Structures are given as structure tokens and as C-alpha cells.
Image: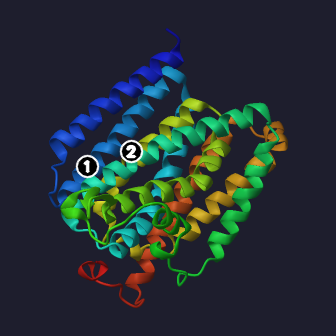
Amino acid sequence: MTTDQITYLVFGAVLIVALILDLGLLSKKNQKVSIKQALYQTFFWVGLALVFFVFMWVEKGQVLALEYLSAYLMEWSLSIDNIFVFILIFASFSVKEKHFGRVLLIGILMAIVFRVIFITVGVALVNEFEKILLVFGAFLVYTGYKMFRASADEEFEPHDTKIYRFLKRVLPLVPHDGDGKFVVREEGKRKYTTLFIVVMMLAAIDLVFALDSIPAVMGISRDKLVIYTSNVFAVLGLRSLFFLLRGAVSKFDYLQQGIAIVLVFIGLKMLGEHWINQWIDKTIQVFISLGVILVCISGSIFYSIFMVKKGEPPDVTDEGVY
């Protein structure tokens, strides 16, 4: 067996065991998840990702391990943006809290399947047409610029999205959750509940976010193993992160700007890679990328908290989110 095959095998085995533990021991069907439980689950998934980082260091070396860590942190920070949208989707479709866990799990597992397909296509395109990385780089710079300048007042409305309008046009829908079911029979016909719509929207919205995050990861590393594993670990941790941050995510007012700076940095790095490789060693490049990600993300979060403490208008209470 090659080193790559061993790493993929370990990754797959770890994921299967982790999902069994998460679903069997850390999660229960139709049960509200407390902050304490969410904290344990978040520690579990982040700890697992860091253990895999150590395994990567041993099996694949320092550079690839640090690329994996940088890519994971990039994806993890972008996940917080996902969570804000997830909150709006749940609120818009009046999803009961007891259904949150199951709906999130199914939506996230579907998102992983879509991301794997998206990554496979993206890697194939890069291998066939390496110049497309310049397009990705320009796209990241443009996206980061737009994100940095975006107004906080531009609120996402799930019922106005193309995804919802498409589902409404092609599927027979009912305006209720079917008491936890995804499909019900009414008037002798098979109809889809709001929970089904929410699951589909979670998976689709995550794929939209992947349009930014996957090119960004490719700007950090070209290694398929790094791209796949960092994405999967970050997405699997979304559910616990949702329950942990759902009452506080709206307080991170400047996180978007921090992420935007990182996207612009990675985009510029991709555009100037030919010249950067001539002047800066690959290992140093990885350390610089990791440092920029850590400084921008942690700095924007702490700055958001600091600004709130200095007397910004208070946010809606946790009870008011729903």
C-alpha cells in the first residue's frame, strides 16, 4: 500500500467511527441540544481534525500537514458564515428546535457528497487546464472585495432564493413539517414538507459557499488529500458549531471583513504564484498563509467582541432569534 492509500484508509475509518460515536453517543433523535452538549461535540470534531493533522505530519511531512491545517482553518472560519444563513433558513421555515439536529445532519451529509463531486471536477479542471487557477485567483479577489464592502443590512431571505422558487415550481409542497416527516400523503398525493425543503436548501447553500471556499483551499494546497480532508472535517463540524454559536454568531459583525481579507490574500497569491515561488520557499509560504488566516480570523472575531463591549447597540436576545 502507498502512503496516500494508507492515509485515505485511515481518514475513511476515522470518519465512520466518528459518525457512529456522534450519532450514537453524542446525539439523540428529536432532542434539543444544549450549549454544553454542543461544546463537547465541537471539541470532539475539532480535536479529531487536529489528531488527523498530527497523523498527516507523521505520514506526509511538515509542509502537507501545515497546508491541511491552514485549509481546515480557512474552511472552519467560512463555516461561521454558513451558520448565520442556516439560522435564517430555520427561522424562515419555522423549524422546531427538536428537529434541528436531524435536519442539519442530513443536509450536511448531502453537502459533503456535493462537495466531493465539486472538488473532483475542480481538481480535474486544474490538472487539465492549469491556467484556470488564474481565473480562480481573480474570482477570489473579486469575491473578497465584494464581501468586504457588503452591507450588514443586505439580509438573506430564503423564500426569495432561486433554489426555493425552483423547488416550489417542480415539487408539490405542504406548508408544514409533517410532524417531523419529509414526505406526507395528502389528498392521495405524495407531497413534500418544509423539513424536506430546508434539507435541500442547506445542501444547496453550502454548495454556493463552496464556490468561494474550494478555490481558496486550492490556493493553499494543490494536494487532493488536503483539499478533500480539510473540507470534509470542516463541514462535519458544522452541526455542533451551529448549536454552539447560534445565539452568538450575529455578534461577529466584523468576521466577514476578516474572511474577505483572507480571500483577497489567497487570490493574489494564486495570481502571483509564478513569481512568489521564485523568491519564497514553499515551507515559508505555508507558514505565511497560516499566519494570515489565524491573524485575520481571530482578529476580526476579537474586534467584533471588543466593539460590542465598547457600547454598540445590543443584539437581539437568543430567544428573539427564533
Quadrant of the rendered image containing residue 247:
bottom left
> Which amino acid, mark 1?
Gln
Quadrant of the rendered image containing residue 307:
bottom left
Quick check: marks 1 and 2 in contact, CB under 8 Å? no
Name the residue: 68% across, 52% down. Answer: 266
Name the residue: 33% across, 44% down. Answer: 45
**Residue 14 versus residue 104 in the image, above or below:** above
Label 2 sits on a secondary structure element that is helix
Distance, label 1 to label 2, CA atoms, is: 17 Å
Q: Is residue 281 visible?
A: no
Label 1 sits on a secondary structure element that is helix
Relative to 49, is 211 on the left or the right?
right
Relative to 121, is 108 on the left or the right?
left
Provide the residue designation for mark 2. 109
Residue in front for this viewpoint, 19 or 10: 19
Name the residue: 57% across, 47% down. Answer: 290
Image quadrant containing the C terminus: bottom left
**Farthest residue, direction front:** 188
**Residue 303 versus residue 66 in the image, above or below:** below
- Callout in the foreground (1, 2): 2
| Residue 320 point in image, percent of width and height | 27, 83
- Colouring mode (rainbow / by chain / secondary structure / one colour): rainbow
Mark identifier at residue 41: 1
| Residue 28 point in image, percent of width and height | 15, 49
| Residue 262 point in image, percent of width and height | 62, 58
| Residue 269 point in image, percent of width and height | 74, 49
